[in-house]
Structure formats: structure tokens, C-alpha cells
Image (tube, rainbow, N blue to C red):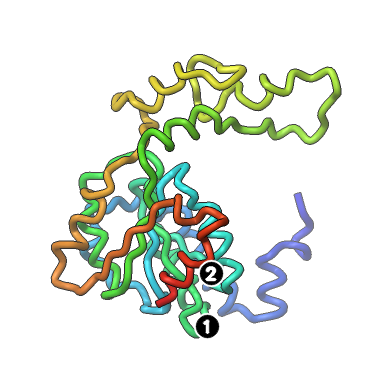
């Protein structure tokens, strides 16, 4: 355990005062419990500060990381407002207040689960542009099979079985793959599982399309982020 003098709370009180510490503790408690705030109640929330340029809808294995890195190089800060059925409302609100000159964008992440209250999310956004990153299902499944997940160990040995290290336990595979295998598709295609791939491109944004607020929706296929045409794609999006 760290000495009290080295704690973040002590440092805040010393450098910024008691008020800053109270705010820190308040938002720490909110971050702890906000993941339990379901979308069912978001209609009661006030809209987030309009301190962002647009909203990005991200889907797994659809080049979301590559696009996020590019936007970061453009000095745009990512603020997650939604992730797999959980609102990040209070955390997003706090981060947006700290952003200068609207140099940020909101990220709505649809990794796996479908949420029947997703339509309520429009209440916390002001009219803006929405960019949806898409990819065809076959390519997504192919990437899932080949994805793998590195072991978190920091030391490797020359006689280690690297295929096994890379694939065993990948995202909960029940078959414990030690190499890419089409059997892994059964895991991602079973609705009964807690982890299922999200392909609800229309139902996830239906509320935005039907909203009285003016949301302008744009689609981009991850193929358009290919290095050969990425520059032209970004020029088009910038307009």
C-alpha cells in the first residue's frame, strides 16, 4: 500500500485544494456505478455538452482501431459515450467539459450485445453528423478466426509454442484453438452466448433516423481506409 503522502487524493488536496479533491471523489464514484445505469433511463438525462465534432459508430474487426489512430493524429480526442449496452454518460460529460475548441468526437461502440433500449440513446446527443464504419460479414468473420490474442506474459522462451500462446483462450473460445480454425465461427454465431457479434447496423441507428433532431448520417466501408485510397477518403470526409 502506498503511503498517504503519495496518494492521488493527497496530491490533489495539496496542489489544487479540497474542492478539487471532492470533485475527483464524486466522479470516481460515478464511474464506478455508471456502468450499471442501463439505457432504459437515459431519456431522463440532459444532453451531453456539444463539445464534439461528430459521432462515430464503431464495430468490432472493422478497422475501428486504424480510423481511431488517424483521428488521434488529427488531434481529435476520442470520448466513449456508449459501449455494449452500457452508457458512459458521466465519464463522457466530464471529459467533454475539459476538451478545448470541440477537438473531440464521440464513440458509440457496438462490440457484441444488442440492447433493446438503444433507441433511448438519442436523447443525450445534440444534432450532429454520424459516421458509421462498416465491413462485410464474411470479412469480419475471417478476421475473427485469424485474430488471436497475445498472452500477457512479458517473458517468452525460444521453445514456447507461439501458436498456442496466441490462440488459446482467445476471447473465450470454448474449443481452445491453437491455430486458426473455422470451428471458431460457432462461438460468434450463437445468440445464446454472452458474446455475440453485433451486425445490427440498421436497428442501432434507427432512432437517429427517426429522431426529430437533425442527424446527418454517413457510411464508410473499411475498404476505403486502404492505404492506396485512404488519403482521398479522408479528404472526402473532411468536407
Could you say where residue 151 lies in the image, as x and y percent from the top left?
68, 30
Tell me if 60 is positioned left or right of 5 in this view: left
Quarter of the image with the C terminus is bottom left
From what the image shows, is residue 135 above or below residue 91? Answer: above
Secondary structure, mark 1, is: loop
Residue 10, position in %: x, y?
70, 69
Element at label 2:
strand
Nearer to us in this view, 16 or 40: 40
> Viewed as shown, does residue 199 lie left or right of 8?
left
Which image quadrant for residue 25? bottom right
Residue at x-position 58% and y-position 66%: 72
**Residue 126 bears which disc, if any?**
none
- Is 52 on the left-hand or right-hand side of 191? right
The percent position of residue 9, horizontal first and vertical second, equals 66, 66
Identify the mark at residue 100; answer none if there is no mark: 1
Position above or below: 237 against 107: below
Q: How far separated are the C-alphas under marks 1 and 2?
A: 10 Å
Q: Is residue 35 visible?
A: no
| View extreme (front): residue | 228
Q: Residue placed at 68% from the left, 65% from the top?
A: 8
> Which tag, 1 or 2, sits closer to the chain's start?
2
Q: What crowding class fits label 1: few (fewer than 14 Cα within 10 Å), some (14-19), or many (20 or more)?
A: few
Location of mark 2 (residue): 77
Location of residue 20 in the rendering, given as x and y in whole percent from the top left corner: 58, 77
Q: Nearer the viewer, residue 179 or 123?
A: 179
Specify few, some or many for label 2: CA neighbours under 10 Å numbering under 14, 14-19, or 20 or more: some
Foreground residue among 221 and 100? 221
Residue at the spot x=70%, y=34% of the render?
A: 152
Amino acid at each position: 500500500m502506498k503511503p498517504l503522502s503519495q496518494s492521488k487524493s493527497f496530491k490533489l488536496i495539496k496542489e489544487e485544494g479540497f474542492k478539487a479533491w471532492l470533485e475527483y471523489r464524486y466522479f470516481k464514484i460515478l464511474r464506478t456505478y455508471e456502468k450499471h445505469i442501463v439505457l432504459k433511463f437515459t431519456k431522463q438525462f440532459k444532453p451531453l455538452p456539444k463539445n464534439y465534432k461528430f459521432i462515430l459508430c464503431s464495430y468490432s474487426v472493422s478497422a475501428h482501431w486504424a480510423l481511431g489512430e488517424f483521428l488521434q493524429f488529427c488531434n481529435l480526442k476520442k470520448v466513449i459515450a456508449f459501449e455494449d449496452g452500457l452508457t458512459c454518460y458521466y465519464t463522457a460529460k466530464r471529459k467533454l467539459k475539459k476538451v478545448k475548441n470541440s477537438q473531440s468526437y464521440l464513440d458509440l461502440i457496438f462490440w457484441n450485445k444488442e440492447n433493446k433500449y438503444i433507441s433511448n440513446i438519442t436523447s443525450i446527443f445534440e444534432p450532429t453528423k454520424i459516421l458509421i464504419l462498416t465491413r462485410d460479414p464474411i470479412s469480419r468473420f475471417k478476421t475473427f478466426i485469424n485474430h488471436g490474442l497475445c498472452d500477457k506474459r512479458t517473458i517468452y522462451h525460444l521453445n514456447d509454442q507461439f501458436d498456442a500462446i496466441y490462440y488459446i483462450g482467445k476471447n473465450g473460445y470454448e474449443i481452445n484453438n491453437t491455430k486458426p480454425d473455422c470451428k471458431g465461427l460457432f462461438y460468434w454465431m450463437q445468440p445464446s452466448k454472452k458474446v455475440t457479434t453485433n451486425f445490427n447496423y440498421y436497428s442501432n441507428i434507427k432512432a437517429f433516423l427517426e429522431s426529430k433532431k437533425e442527424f446527418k448520417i454517413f457510411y464508410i466501408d473499411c475498404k476505403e481506409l486502404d492505404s492506396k485510397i485512404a488519403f482521398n477518403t479522408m479528404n472526402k470526409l473532411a468536407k
